Amino acid sequence: MSSRPHEVSDPSWLGRSIDARPLFAREHAALMATLRGLERADWQKEAVPGWAVHDVAAHVLGDYYGRLGRDRDGHQHGPVFAPGETLEAFIHRINQEWVEAHRRVSPAALTDTLNLVGVQVSRFFETADPHKPSLGVSWAGIDPAPMWLDSARDFTEFWTHRQQIRHATGQETDPDPRSLSVVLDTFMRALPHTLRDTPASVGTQIQVHVEGPAGGTWTVTATEAHWSLAEPDAGPPAARVSLDAETAWRLCTRAIEPATALARTRIDGNRQLAEAACRIVSIVY
């Protein structure tokens, strides 16, 4: 097996396409309801290490503006890479610069602006061509990516940031299975890239099963060129990983580490292959 890059002209190894487009408006409305329900003190509670709720909300606004400017308006004057800067370092740097600049913006003004711009983002995605080439998705190992994956990636980011705000303010993960099922389905598209350096004979299959109404089963297969989510099931897999939905999404976003996830996971078959699958990361990390 090799780990050569895949071509967007045939992204079939990613599995069937995902249509997250109808969910953006509902996700945006849920974010607005969450923010408008916060107390003044909630905005300064830590949502992720180093970022308060206010910072996470400002970051979402930056994502909104970035998507509209780049893909709707053709704006070409955004931040650029510093010499020798990696993609991960570039993204972390510009995100930090953005949230620091927006700490002077009041929660009320930030919420109003998010509402105004977020509606436009939802409209953009609703009419986007799901099969046109779009931004690469580094954690899935494809650049450019088809728009269906790029837009689903953005949906997972907006959903995840809303959960971070909910958790910071004493609320549990939103149990709505319709949104979470799309989030999990998108996150699992990282499996072939996660396993790119894991040796296995052609035809070897690893199955990941997420329990509950938002869950599902994903089978990744070793082919001559790479691991693929497109191959049919071929009997019992060499390894099967079973975990609950909360553990799955937290693992994919590194809210928990693989060792913690493994402690909550049932493994059948080859443990080495199962542990390799549990190194999945579905964010820029």
Image (tube, helix red, strand yellow):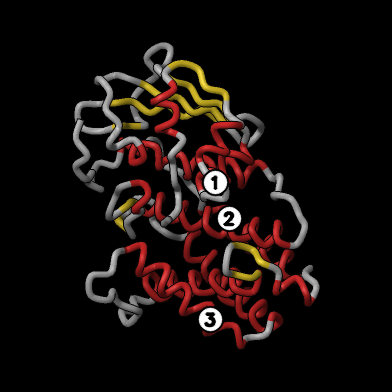
Q: How far across and down, in percent of the image, does residue 24 sit?
A: 57, 58
Is residue 26 visible to the viewer in this orientation of the structure?
Answer: no
In the rendered view, does 169 fall on the left or right side of 100?
right
Q: Amino acid under label 1?
A: Val
In the rendered view, does 69 fall on the left or right side of 165?
left
Q: How far across and down, in percent of the image, does residue 245 sit?
A: 62, 37
The quarter in which the C terminus is drawn is bottom left
User: Residues under labels 1 and 2: Cα distance?
Assistant: 9 Å
Q: Which residue is mark 1?
A: 183
Q: Comparing marks 1 and 2, which lies closer to the viewer?
A: 2
Secondary element at image label 2: helix
Q: Which residue is mark 3?
A: 100
Query: Label 1 crowding class (10 Å Cα cut-off): few <14, some 14-19, many 20+?
Result: many
Is residue 209 visible to the viewer in this orientation of the structure?
Answer: yes
How many numbered marks are there? Answer: 3
Q: Residue 23 versus residue 202: which sits nearer the camera?
A: 202
State which quadrant residue 119 falls in: bottom right
Q: Earlier in the sequence, mark 3 or mark 1?
A: 3
Q: Which residue is located at x 40 percent, y 55 percent?
A: 150
Q: Which residue is located at x 28 percent, y 74 percent?
A: 81
Seen as rendered, the residue at the extreme top is: 235
Q: How far across and down, in percent of the image, does residue 212 sit?
A: 66, 31
Q: How far across and down, in percent of the image, does residue 156 sit?
A: 53, 53
